Amino acid sequence: MQHTFYKYQGTGNDFVMIDNRQQLFDKNNTKHIALLCDRRFGIGADGLILLENHTVLDFKMVYYNADGNESSMCGNGGRCLVAFAKQLGIIERKCSFEAIDGLHHATIENGVVNLQMQDVAKVDRFANHVFLDTGSPHHVQFESKIEDFDIKTEGARIRYGAPYNHTGSNVNFVKKLSETNFRVRTYERGVEDETLSCGTGVTAVALAMHYIGETEENLIKLEVQGGQLQVRFEVQNGGYKNVWLIGPAKFVFKGEWIG
Ligand SMILES: N[C@@H](CCC[C@H](N)C(=O)O)C(=O)O
């Protein structure tokens, strides 16, 4: 049987997208999902996303990491899914969808997707890092030598170490460039390597930098390996609301696999 897939990327965070409105995709075959994401034996991607029907909203997002396991929210994947829904003719310029972390609103114009992320009620500040959940768990710490830093080795050490252990956390290394601009490199759980961009990661960095007083701005530019993203937000009772992740989402190619 032939199956159609679409490949998308958002600032270099890349995804296999599948229209699963007919429920034909085998969601429990972890090895098969990992194979489709494999860069040598498969299509190659940081994750795989299913677009499914929703009873009241425009669609539903189901996200798997490259290791084949369903995981928590993917911000760049959500942005790409909005572009995919537009390509499929499901939406035009505005939409609402459900993901594992709840309801999301989004707009798309000229290939740029504005995606509303969950409110963040709690930010934990430690001596050398900040931890918060922006739909996915994120450890944020400064790294002055960010360009030469071994993200994979150090990211894995933190991700697998205490207090995260088996459950893990994504790990973001940050360098402040100015009051409004921060450089970010992210080690992603479930990819178990550095990715070129992480949407929930840059959201976490923007909020963390505001929380610890590194910036008083509420529109932050994040420079990642694959381009630039923006995050804007409002402060609410020591937490954050109206959090938006903004950036490009691009269709790369379409293909078929036999299975
Ligand atoms: N690339 C994503 C994050 C995907 C989830 C993450 N790997 C996890 O399992 O926590 C993003 O853009 O947010």
Image (cartoon, rainbow, N blue to C red):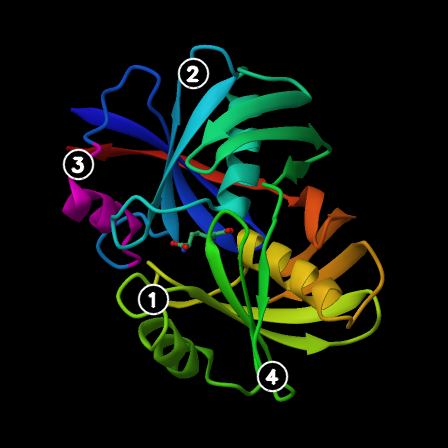
Query: Which secondary structure lies at badge 2?
Result: loop
In what quadrant of the picture does the N terminus appear? top left
Q: Earlier in the sequence, mark 1 or mark 2?
A: 2
Image point (37%, 62%), residue name: 189
Query: Which secondary structure lies at badge 1?
Result: loop
Residue 3 relative to residue 18: left or right: left
In the picture of the structure, the residue carrying the numbered disc 4 is: 143
Residue lying furthest front: 237
In the picture of the structure, the residue carrying the numbered disc 1 is: 192
Mark 1 or 2: in front is 2
Q: Residues within 10 Å of mark 2 (few under 14, many from 20)?
A: few
Query: Which secondary structure lies at badge 4?
Result: loop
Residue 93: quadrant of the picture: top right
Q: Earlier in the sequence, mark 3 or mark 2?
A: 3
* Whole-percent x, y for residue 172 in the image: 53, 69
* Whole-percent x, y for residue 162 in the image: 34, 76
Image point (43%, 10%), residue name: 55
User: Magenta segment range?
Assistant: 27-39
